[in-house]
Image (tube, coloured by chain):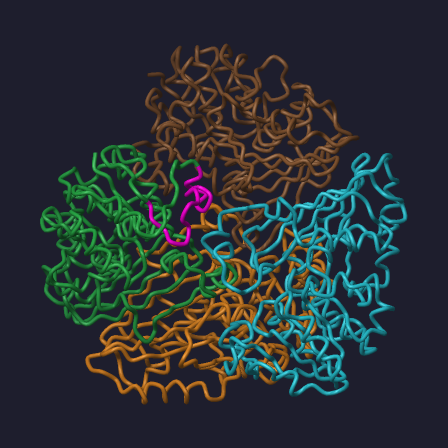
Chain colours: A orange, B cyan, C brown, D green
């Protein structure tokens, strides 16, 4: 029974992590540190956690409590995680960092669980991938065996929780409802992470990436289009996906349905479908940006790091079906 | 391990029942009968049940399969349930009917679980209450001890799944989004059920009931106002609620928070708050119209009928907190 | 052609005022002052004003520009308006203040246009009513002739723009979507304004007021219930409303429909319906919280103050129907 | 003052056409025929038209009323329009058909107003383009001068009114809210119309088209990606768009903003932005699927056919800015 602390515990991804950890049979919720919410009951700020028996602790509480053998999820803001993570490591803890701070650091294991499980299993520090990179890499890495496409187009639609819980005009209900808007049109922070991931796993190619906000609280659909100089064989493409994810309890191929955000909300699942449309292979991937795109994958990484079955506490047994 | 069949299995309440039953440790999902969806996988029509290993069966399938000791949830349309329920009873099954067909029948047990548990425990046929009556009665019955108020005003806000899954213009996204509308202004089917329930439990009074549709898929908030000829003692009111629900695993009083739909979605919980405002007592009650207002309470009734702990499979142990 | 300046021009009510003023045939948009948005194009921040040929000006710009004969709409934060309004008045301008700063000041005209037009016509400073008070008073004042009820219950449902455009956690999309929540359960700023308004127009009575946020960007539905010691005559009630609003271009009684938020969005209209339910009279009133509940009524007040027909520029001629 | 009748007047596009026609200074609303709604007030079924002084007429009413010189908008179901349109033409009317019935007929003028104005001006029968084709062709036709790309990828996000007002499970609020789903993954009716349009205007190329439903009542964003064998010059691309739409009152290029659905709702506008991303040109186009994508363009076509300025009654003068 390892303890898992959460640093930066008052954000959306953190709240989802608390929910998952609370139901995890082999992990125990430790200290939930939040500067801004110190002292408050968790259920007061997050209705979905209304009955959770936890309170937020103040600054420094995780560091004061952490022991060797513990795990810390760093769910605080980009830029603040690096120093904290290092202190937690020195205290003997394992760390999964949900910020972007370590994702470009060659010395740190990239926590794309379906593609990097062996490295994660031995790691003490894991950089949890971003939500867009997770969905995009799950969609495109099985195609690596077919060689580099001429061009990759990634058109992503995300719920607004991806923007975090720190209030901003752009995340207000009145701005998000009744609108669909692209953003980052002059360049988005996730593009280099996707490019790095594609290259690292042998699938590098020119990339045009466009993220959009749609009127959803949570959930993400990525449409990835790989344009080749020839038409790929549809059966070979299908086989590539089947083989890539044969052992994964979380990745589900659907052939006669459309991958749907509603099918993955609240889970660590990814729902994919690949089609050959002439010289373009279109792959749709639906995830919960707070689940597989953040907290779910973080717990999956904790499981791997601790030598537990990777699906423990992530609803595969309990889930419907 | 009793089997629970569902007749009329392709509606929203039925899908929620299937979800709950699937995770129930002491009940087994039996035949899921749907004329319109016969043969289809459940997960094809309900994304949240994507991985459920069930298919819909055709007309007559429940009756052909039902054995003594089984339970049948009748989740079909109002008016069609009576004949079916009687056939299932004759085949030796227990029946919980979610339609309005038996709610006014004195010979049938009214399944308001928190207030009628003893009768439900011995019943072979239970009329599951409507969603508005459930929330309203939970809000008002604890006040019965104070005598009849001069007037009761019930202002209810419901998600649109209360209207069912049979397509109608009024339930289209484009009609429900960006609107709040009262309905049944000339009289609503649930008003007599509420009046009957108030009277049956000693809390009858003149009632003005107004239901509204708000842009929610699921969830319901009822604001019940009881206007007295005097000011009630706030401590006594609070004590009445505390005593009424002391033994209930599902009813939660909140004093310093607002009852919130988001806090009860996907659960069989009810969240209540009572305030004395001069000569008016205001009680807010939030439930999931598909949970406590339909499928959750139906499973709670099945538990009671079978002599199981009433919370089995209803998330009290597993739930956050 | 009078000029109308807007002080505090970057909020939701201000943006609606700019939209209305831009199309007003007898008013001219003057200086749009916003500390936070100085220099930016209006259309950059408000998509619905994309093509508006205006920029925000910086602090002090209105005061520097204002002339005798101009009008200033004060749409800034509560607490800051008083000092500004006085400066604008001294510069010779008429002022309509949309904050709460003057609403309790006996020396200032209360801008409830349908009920106070004569006073408004001669005023140099008008306190524009809050959105909840506007809808509630329109619903209840016609009942004054029947004497005081025993109790008034007001259950109000509002879109989130009523909370303003300054970012807060409670106004984020992820908090407002999929929830309905009451607030101000321990007392709400608008309750005294409603009580004052009821008393001022001869309709005072004990009031239980409960505001709710529903998942709407804009729009408001108020259900007002007046509980009497006797049953009022339905025809007399209907006649009272008909007489009260016979001359109003903006108030519309509906008898066979439910007043609907969707029917008033983007307008200065109010849609009402009154029913006698035993000893309770129920009046529903739908308005746009940014229209009749803020900017629309503000422009109506400007029209009255300047001696223009009160509907000028408010869509009565142009509107559908 | 020409009369415009609407056949099939009870759908979403028809209701938007009625709204626009009602405010049109040079057109008069004629007979509004709807089999299903005959006799009802328009405002009873469409809250946004609450005050419109019209009723629906029964079957055959348009044909009985139509005179030479009139115009008929055919807004009924695909498949039923052809026979009706021919009868209206024989009666001497001009016809704009909003269904798909004539879009593939070489003898009928394709009503893509910005690109086919001369032909429309002389036409008696115009096939109004679909919403997806309109947005896609506006995005891609300016690129024709650069030669054929290797591949075109079109990723479209639409509000649900595009599915019409005939009730279906997939258009229910509870199915559309909280989901984003692609559809037509095995082929969509609009793909051949887009291909035909691209070819007709010299911009043919292999096309991968994927439509999605997002939780919006109305509005559409199309992301069109043209993949070339070389990098196009960004200034030349910008110039191509500037020249293509220099004379259009409705098409607006934005360079430093993201085209936004919220900026075009309720208008006949299209908001575009083009970027060169390596060898891919990305063009975003936002329209109102009921405006420029249906009723707005239909009225624009009526204006052109009658020799009126094309923007008459379409809000260019009245609109904000």
Q: Which of A211 and B123 lies nearest the eye of the viewer?
A: B123
Residue C279 image point, x, y percent: 75, 35
Residue A28's place in the image compared with C136, above or below, is below
Q: Nearer the viewer, residue B165 or A23?
A: B165
- Image x and y of residue B182, in percent: 59, 45
In this rendering, would B97 be left or right of D237? right
Left or right? Give the position of D293 relative to C168: left
- The N terminus of chain A - image quarter: bottom right
The span shown in magenta is: D32-50
Residue in the foreground of this view, choosing between C15 and D167: D167
The part of the image, by quadrant, that contains residue D306 is top left
Answer with left or right where residue B223 lies relative to residue D47: right
Residue D1, quarter of the rendered image: top left
Please tell me which residue is depicted at 17% across the width and 62% down the height of the picture. D197
Residue C211: x and y in percent read 64, 40
Residue drawn 64% across and 49% down? B211
């Amino acid at each position: 029974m390892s303890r898992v602390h959460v640093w930066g515990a008052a954000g959306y991804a953190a709240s989802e992590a608390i929910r998952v950890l609370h139901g995890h049979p082999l992990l125990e919720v430790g200290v939930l540190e939040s500067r801004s919410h110190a002292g408050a009951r968790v259920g007061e700020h997050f209705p979905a956690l209304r009955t959770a028996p936890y309170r937020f602790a103040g600054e420094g509480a995780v560091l004061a409590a952490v022991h060797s053998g513990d795990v810390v999820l760093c769910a605080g803001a980009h830029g603040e995680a690096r120093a904290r993570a290092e202190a937690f490591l020195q205290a003997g803890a394992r760390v999964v960092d949900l910020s972007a701070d370590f994702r470009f650091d060659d010395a740190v294991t990239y926590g794309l669980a379906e593609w990097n499980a062996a490295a994660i299993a031995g790691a003490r520090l894991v950089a949890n991938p971003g939500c867009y990179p997770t969905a995009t890499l799950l969609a495109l890495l099985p195609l690596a065996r077919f060689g580099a496409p001429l061009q990759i187009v990634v058109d992503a639609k995300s719920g607004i929780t991806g923007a975090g819980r720190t209030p901003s005009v752009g995340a207000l209900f009145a701005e998000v409802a009744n609108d669909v808007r692209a953003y980052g049109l002059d360049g988005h922070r996730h593009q280099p992470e996707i490019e790095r991931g594609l290259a690292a796993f042998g699938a590098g190619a020119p990339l045009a990436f466009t993220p959009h906000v749609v009127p959803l609280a949570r959930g993400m659909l990525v449409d990835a289009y790989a344009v080749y100089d020839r038409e790929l064989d549809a059966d070979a493409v299908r086989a590539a996906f089947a083989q890539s994810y044969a052992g994964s309890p979380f990745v589900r191929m659907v052939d006669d349905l459309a991958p749907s955000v509603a099918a993955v909300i609240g889970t660590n699942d990814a729902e994919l479908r690949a089609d050959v449309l002439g010289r373009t292979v279109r792959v749709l991937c639906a995830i919960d940006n707070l689940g597989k795109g953040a907290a779910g994958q973080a717990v999956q990484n904790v499981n791997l790091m601790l030598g537990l079955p990777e699906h423990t506490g992530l609803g595969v047994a309990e889930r419907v079906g």
